[in-house]
Amino acid sequence: MGAPGAGTRRPRVVTPVAGSRDSRTEEILRRLELTVTHRLDGMLHGDHLGLVPGHGSELGETRRYVAGDDVRRIDWNVTARMQTPYLRATIADRELETWVVLDRSGSLDFGTARCTKADLALAATGAVGFLTARTGNRIGALSIDPGCDRLIPARGGRSHLMQILHLVADGRRAGEGGTVDLARSLERLAPMLHRRGLVVVISDFLSDADWRRPLRMLATRHEVLAIEIVDPRELELPDVGPVALYDPETGRSMRVDTSSASLRVRYRAAAEAQRAEMAATLRGAGVEHLQLRTDRDWVADLVRYVALRRRRMMGPGAVRVGAVRITQ
């Protein structure tokens, strides 16, 4: 449940202003931009339209329906002719408005591998921004902080993107722990997005709130990608003896003995069940799902996701039926 009055709380519109900037933040963002533009962009070579190529509005080729495809894109004329379901593909629009929704709850401050989950969330935000904003597309952001949602209007240009990343990076280090209501924030955002576009939700999705409905509502009009941020210690406990565990969102703490094999088995099983339920909820909401982990190469995971999505959208082959080119 959200905090009292959360249902009426409106996002605070923030206009990024260039000013004095921390040298450490500048260095972090400079390395991030180099990673995206050199390594990531080099691996995603070829004719691609950014992080998530949308369906667009211009009609393209037709291909056979496969399980999991969007039934709203079925071409009924070709389906009737072929006596089996076919989809009408569309050519993705080149002008895209992207919105990044960033969960800034206290649980993102956790990290036991290469970085914290907040660091990885910043990297994901930068990857989305640099990959979608480079061709003149507009990008906006909703930062969901404990006690306050900050809305940054969508604009184009590298300078605007860097100002967004500065706010995220500075706020990430200065932010205090606490809970956020991801579901309510998504509900408030939906009516503010007047143009069809891409919505990227970056979170660990550990909230107890039911965020399936607002995600489904966004997915009816926009391309939606859920980027799940995970640390390996959230999936499996190491055998390090008695430890004190602290919840940065509620402030509660407890001591557990990780030398207990049965405890570690129960923990692993509960974590697997939790993640499986979360993945099923995202599938049920009709959104794309990408998991990034603090102990893995996030660039490689992102490239793998984009490659798999492209193959899914293109289909395995093509034939002609009359004047219509059909992908098998």
Image (cartoon, helix red, strand yellow):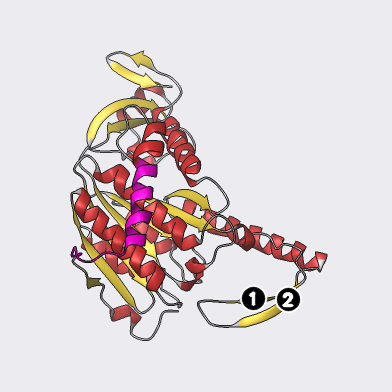
How dense is the environment of label 2, judged by Cα within 10 Å: few (below 14), some, or many (20 and up)?
few
- Going by the numbered disc 2, the residue's amino acid type is Val
189 part of magenta stretch: no
Whole-number angstrom distance, CA of label 1 to CA of label 2: 7 Å
Residue nearest the viewer, comparing 2 with 174: 174
User: Which of the two discs, 1 and 2, labels the residue nearer the N terminus?
Assistant: 1
Say whether residue 281 is visible.
no
Residue nearest the viewer, comparing 136 with 169: 169
What secondary structure is the magenta-colored segment mainly? helix
Q: Which residue is drawn at 37% across and 37% down?
A: 38
Q: Which residue lies furthest to the bottom in this view?
A: 4
Residue 72 at x, y = what percent? 34, 42
In the picture, measured across the screen, residue 145 lies left or right of residue 57, that is right
Q: Tell me which segment is drawn in magenta.
A: 16-36
For label 1, the residue is 245
Mark seen at residue 218: none
For label 2, the residue is 256
Q: In this view, does 23 lie above or below 241?
A: above
Quadrant of the snapshot with the N terminus: bottom left
- Going by the numbered disc 1, the residue's amino acid type is Leu
